[in-house]
Image (cartoon, grey):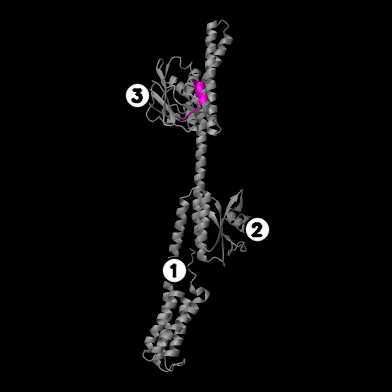
Amino acid sequence: MKLSFKHDLGSDGKGYWFALLVCAATTAIGLPFRTSLDPENAAMLYLVGIALAAAYCGRASSTLAAITSAAAYNFFFTQPYYSFWIDSYRDMVATVLLLVTSIIMGSLAARLRAQSRFFQYKEQTTSALYAMTRELASSRVQDNMLSAIRFHAEDMFDGTATLWLAQDGEIHCITQPELTDDLKEKSAAQFCYEHAQSAGLDTPTLAGARGFYLPFKGSVEVLGVLGFMPKIGVLQSDEKTQLEAVASVAASALERVSVAELAERRKVEAEGEKMRNALLSCVSHDLRTPLASIKGAISSMMIDNTLSADSRMELLTSVHNETTRLERIVSNLLDVTLLESGRLRLKKDYYFMSELVGNALQHTKELLKEHSVECAFDEEIPALWVDGVLIEQVLVNLLENAAKYSPPDSPILIDAWTEEDNIRIIVADRGSGIHSGDEQKLFDKFYRGTQSGQGSGLGLAICRGIIEAHDGKITARKREGGGAVFSFLLPAAHAPDVINEAAA
């Protein structure tokens, strides 16, 4: 769809030939009936031809048709025939009226035609701009938007569209990279970018360029440059206006993407800052407490030389426990760093539930010494194809969480069963349970829930990261009768016979 309302049949000379042809055809039609027609009726035939010339070819062609028709009417239909001499006053008046009427009628018909073509052109341009705007509004990727801008510009006008973007303050053509080395074109595009005004073809600035360049003006800065190289001649004024509209719509769309990207970066930075603040707050609190306990215990042993062996052992046990707690906090921080960076690599192998649970219970025996642990899973459960060290870490974190939020002497349940090609594993306690709305938040980093207690809020977040790395899912829910249930799925696997024999 190439848009322009000023190009018509008369603009290249064809309309003049059409006007002469219409005049000749009208004469040929009326001439056989000259004797039976009144001169006024013959004039009406010429008016029909002039109206056709005005409707199809414009004002200049209709004026030519009016003059030639008046001359033909005088030459063929008024006495004396085949002469431009007019004998009667009546014929003279008829000829003059034919000429004046035909010129006025042709002018009005040509004006109506021009208005019709103009409104048709406006409808086409509006539809074209709407189509481009709709496509740009549905896109969020800059490369796709630039392709759409180029396509619509070339579809609307007869020529080649080029798009230029700035890199380090210097303009570069991204659609035709070879133009970046063309001094005339690059100079025009650079001037357009730096001064935010049109340049190049048919402009006062760098008119020697082959392209007409317009800036993508944003609300704050110029975002790029639209260049257009017409295939024939120069751009008409209406085409330049339309290209300016294209550049304006494109600039708004590009600025929207730019603002969205900036907002996303700001959001990421804000989240990062929030995370850093939460980490500092959490770590400073969680590290200060055990360090203070360790320092206090060591200071007591250094100052008081009269301490009994039992008192020294109690202080050393406290130092050992607090050191273990510090080690667990630092380990959790390292695990979160690996999960967040995507550098966690799974070392999968075949493992059995009894092996994983046994190792986890061994690591948490001090924490669980005041709780009874019940393992209800069947020994015949298939093997798991997992990273055993990481799954043990998940079980350890869940058992620590259960011990921390459960009263002494309360039972903790570990159960497992087969669900299709997966194994469902649960760790359930009889603690204070989970508050409504906390089921998913519990797995967020640094979230400690509405309950009071020590902890960095990283244990459950690490569990979720490890389970999701195994393509599984972990959930939390209230337990009937009180308490909480943490459940996750892991893929089952058919272990080789040699492993089954070893396990047996």
**Is residue 293 positioned above or below 126 on the image?**
above
For the point 53% across and 50% down, the residue is 143
Q: Which residues are magenta?
A: 491-504
Q: Are marks 1 and 2 in contact (CB under 8 Å)?
A: no
The residue tagged 3 is: 480
**Is residue 305 positioned above or below 459 on the image?**
above
- Other residues around mark 3 within 10 Å, as few (<14) / some (14–19) / many (≥20): few
The residue tagged 1 is: 117
For the point 51% across and 44% down, the residue is 261
Q: Is residue 449 visible?
A: no
Q: Nearer the viewer, residue 38 or 399?
A: 399
Image spot of residue 180 (x, y percent): 63, 55
Judged from the image, the secondary structure of the residue bearing numbered disc 3 is loop
Residue type, mark 3 in image: Glu
Quadrant for residue 412, please give it. top left
- Other residues around mark 2 within 10 Å, as few (<14) / some (14–19) / many (≥20): few
Q: Nearer the observer, disc 2 or disc 3?
A: 3
Image spot of residue 381 (x, y percent): 44, 25
- Other residues around mark 1 within 10 Å, as few (<14) / some (14–19) / many (≥20): some
Name the N-terminal-most of marks 1 and 3.
1
Image spot of residue 107 (x, y percent): 43, 77
Residue type, mark 1 in image: Arg
Q: Residue 497: within the magenta?
A: yes
Image spot of residue 142 (x, y percent): 52, 49
The residue tagged 2 is: 183
Judged from the image, the secondary structure of the residue bearing numbered disc 1 is helix
Q: Give the spatial CA distance, label 1 vs label 3.
A: 78 Å
Q: Nearer the viewer, residue 128 or 95?
A: 128
